[in-house]
Amino acid sequence: MRNAVNEVVREAYVRDCEKGLARWNRHLEEADYPQRMSLPSTRFRRTVGSWANISTNPEGKPIGLEEFKRASGGMATNIR
């Protein structure tokens, strides 16, 4: 039950963050900057939940541990 509540709260937090990013991206577009910001997947760099300690890329796709370590600059710990 606690995991379900945590997931609902996490989803609400992500939705709130997405609203803020949409606003920042609108400002970037208005200023003619080509860059856009995005949030990583909720699977990325998890230490709790069903995706805890599983190596994924920022889009949430599972990747090999070696690839994850390379991409994270060797900062990967407790990842299987």
Image: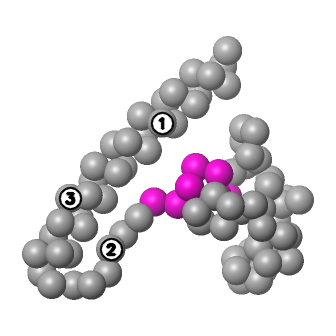
Residue 7 in the image: x percent, y percent? 58, 31
- Where the C terminus falls, by quadrant? bottom right
Q: Residue at x 56, y 55 (%)?
A: 41
- The rendered magenta stretch, by its main secondary structure, is classed as loop
Looking at numbered disc 3 in the image, what kind of residue is underneath it?
Arg
Q: Check disc 1 and report its element: helix, strand or loop.
A: helix
Q: Spatial distance from mark 3 to mark 2, Cα to Cα?
A: 11 Å
Is the residue 5 above or below the residue 70 in the image?
above
Identify the residue under disc 3: 23
- Within 10 angstroms of label 2, few (less than 14), some, or many (20 or more) residues? few
Q: Spatial distance from mark 1 to mark 3, Cα to Cα?
A: 19 Å
N-terminal of the two: label 2 or label 1? Answer: 1
- Within 10 angstroms of label 1, few (less than 14), some, or many (20 or more) residues? few
Q: Which residues are magenta?
A: 39-45
| Foreground residue among 35 and 1 | 35
Q: Is residue 4 left or right of residue 21?
A: right
Q: Residue furthest right?
A: 80
Q: Residue at x 15, y 84 (%)?
A: 32
Q: Check disc 2 and report its element: helix, strand or loop.
A: loop
Identify the residue under disc 2: 36
Looking at numbered disc 1 in the image, what kind of residue is underneath it?
Glu
Residue 72 in the image: x percent, y percent? 70, 77
Residue 2 in the image: x percent, y percent? 66, 19
Is the residue 33 above or below the residue 59 in the image?
below
Q: Is residue 10 left or right of residue 50?
A: left
Q: Spatial distance from mark 2 to mark 1, Cα to Cα?
A: 22 Å
Looking at numbered disc 2 in the image, what kind of residue is underneath it?
Arg
Identify the residue under disc 1: 11
- Where the N terminus falls, by quadrant? top right
Q: Is residue 40 left or right of residue 46?
A: left
